[in-house]
Amino acid sequence: MPKKAVEEIEELRETLRRHEHLYYVLDQPDISDAEYDGLMRRLQQLETQHPELIAPDSPTQRVGGKPREGFVKVAHTSPMLSLDNALNETELIEFDRRVRDLLHGDSYEYVAELKLDGLSMAAQYREGRMQQAITRGDGRVGEDVTENARTIRTLPLRTKSSLKSFEVRGEAIMPRRAFEKLNAKQEEQQLALYANPRNAAAGALRALDPGVTASRQLEYFAYFLLVDGQFHFESHWESLEFLAKLGFKVNPHRKKLAGLDELLDFYRHWEAHRESLPYEIDGLVVKVDSVRQQQSLGWTAKAPRWAIAFKFAAQQAETEVEDINVFVGRTGALTPVAFLRAVNIGGVTVTRASLHNEDEIGRLGVEIGDRVLVERSGDVIPKVVRVVRQGGSRRPFRMPKKCPVCGGEVVREEGEAASRCINTNCPARLKESISHFAARGVMDIDGMGDVLVDQLVSRGLVKSVADIYDLTVEQLLELERMGQKSAEKVIANIDRSRKQPLPRVLNGLGIPFVGERTAQILAEAFGSLDTIAGADDATLQQADEVGPKVSQSIQKFFHEPRNRELVERLREAGLTFTHEIRKKSGGPLAGKTFVLTGTLPNLAREEAKSRIESAGGKVSGSVSKKTSYVVAGDEAGSKLDKAKELGIPVLGEAELLAMLK
Ligand code: IVH
């Protein structure tokens, strides 16, 4: 037995399994798809050379990762297999040759579609209604995400079709704009950013609360129609047209192509124009159009022989890290940025790449002077994928102990990835805090844009958020490009903001982990800013959705003398510090929190939820000490285990119905 091959195979399998777990289960891949493909390739190659070493548990022998706990698992009607990849033109030519050979001179046509970078999902329709939506999962068993899928507007809930039942397969994606909005919001709430739209879409599709999915604005593009597990039309093209007629979103950039040359043209066109699309694509999918020919070409264990994913070259290049510097953001977070020797990646000159935080630098093991692989994707700031070669006279990056903008102390809290400048008056932070305070949806001070904020801070007119309430028309008139009318308007808008309700004031303070939603909850639970400021851990955590992280952040904020002073000045400025406490509604289930898991015999999940709520109870997505009851149906998953672990009473449907009476 070739010992070296055995070792390499074992090592590759281990590595691939780890990455699969990161990718499929945790939605946190830490290598690029291109690198993953490369590793898989190498393993496939070794296994082809040594077929005796193929094991049923090798990553080459299955389609994807395991579905994660938390959703009901459902078997697919027929496996949702994947596609083989062509990573360059030579491999596409090879694919075409194989098709031609296997079709023995029969003429054939391809249908090329964009390869949307999202998650595949199957949706079942009966009597024209969408019944069930299932993620791909491991290809054989997926997760029932019906309730979440219902929130996707491009997935019809009803269609007019004479077919009694059918299944649609397609891709759930997050458009770039929705992704950017989401990340802006994450940043505002000081939460971790999503690495790309694909991960964000995965998170949204598997959110425990369908409301979250709805807010993420996913889209669904259909690309397969199955009737009784079979393709229903004679050609793929016809079924796409049919799906479009039924009301599904079918990607318009599809084309029938006669042969290789047309295929390559189409590919080059989209490689050059992919950035102009409102969503991300990572290549083309090429399918033999005729279903009869598809059948004669058949399938391997993993993929059809009649289709291939023709991937775009990774937008990657190697260069050198010349320096690492830090930038200070709104929350005071110091973001290390690699300054690179200029390199061209896909037609764009790249000179910087974000390194996010100290942990990321540690994970990459990158130092100044190293040669690194850099990846660019869409409009997102480029990122360092890995170190290619360590520099001869490399030197490690150290997070500065003092803020590079104000010289203030830099602190990294336990459990947080970011190091922060804790000086709330740091000009870098100050500008961002004021913009946040004045923003739409917060204190809504119209006219207080970045340009004005910049001038106010640089001229020393505003040294704290509270200072904006002392501004006068005369002061504003001294600023560049500020006329009497605009100045009066801004002052009037500032004045009006004094009446904003407490949740907005609370959000405006910029307390880490207290965004719009938490601010609302806190205001409704405690009724005044002073109560919140003076509350201890136990009291704060009595509020919904407030755990130790949020509670500690609140206490720490109000402990700082500087913040206490800010609060006093805002009080003097006449801001709203009280709020009506939300009365616990009457109803037999008032004050009780329920968690639903599994499938109930009669009640649909939404129905159970609305009945509990109209009886005054609350329904939450996850089991915690605050849960009063867990209602479990068939195939209840980890929530049931958690309930048992925490000793929370578990009810069946009948018991729930009895309580609702
Ligand atoms: S066909 C067996 N068409 O790419 C047929 N897939 O690499 C498999 N994808 O799992 C799917 N756009 O998630 C097909 N127009 C398209 C696609 C597409 C994106 C994804 C899909 C699939 C993966 C295969």
Image (cartoon, rainbow, N blue to C red):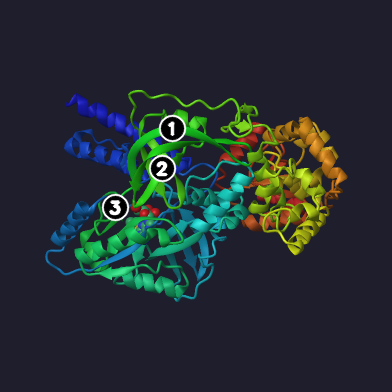
Q: Amino acid at mark 2?
A: Thr
Q: Is residue 14 above or below residue 514?
A: above
Q: Quadrant of residue 650 in the image?
A: top right
Q: Foreground residue, 199 or 417?
A: 417
Measure the alpha-carbon separation of dots 3 and 2.
40 Å
Q: Mark 2 or mark 1: which comes first in sequence?
A: 1
Q: Amino acid at mark 1?
A: Asp
Q: Return the x and y of residue 201 as percentages of the image width and height.
A: 50, 52
Viewer-side label of 3, 1: 1
Answer yes or no: do the residues labelled 2 and 1 have beta carbons within 8 Å? no
Q: Return the x and y of residue 360 as percentages of the image width and height.
A: 48, 33
Ligand 1 closer than 8 Å to label 3 CB: yes
Question: What residue does disc 2 label?
Answer: 351
Residue 303 circle label: 3
Question: What residue does disc 1 label?
Answer: 323
Q: Foreground residue, 341 or 72?
A: 341
Q: Quadrant of residue 240 in the image?
A: bottom left
Determine the quadrant in which ligand 1 lies. Answer: bottom left
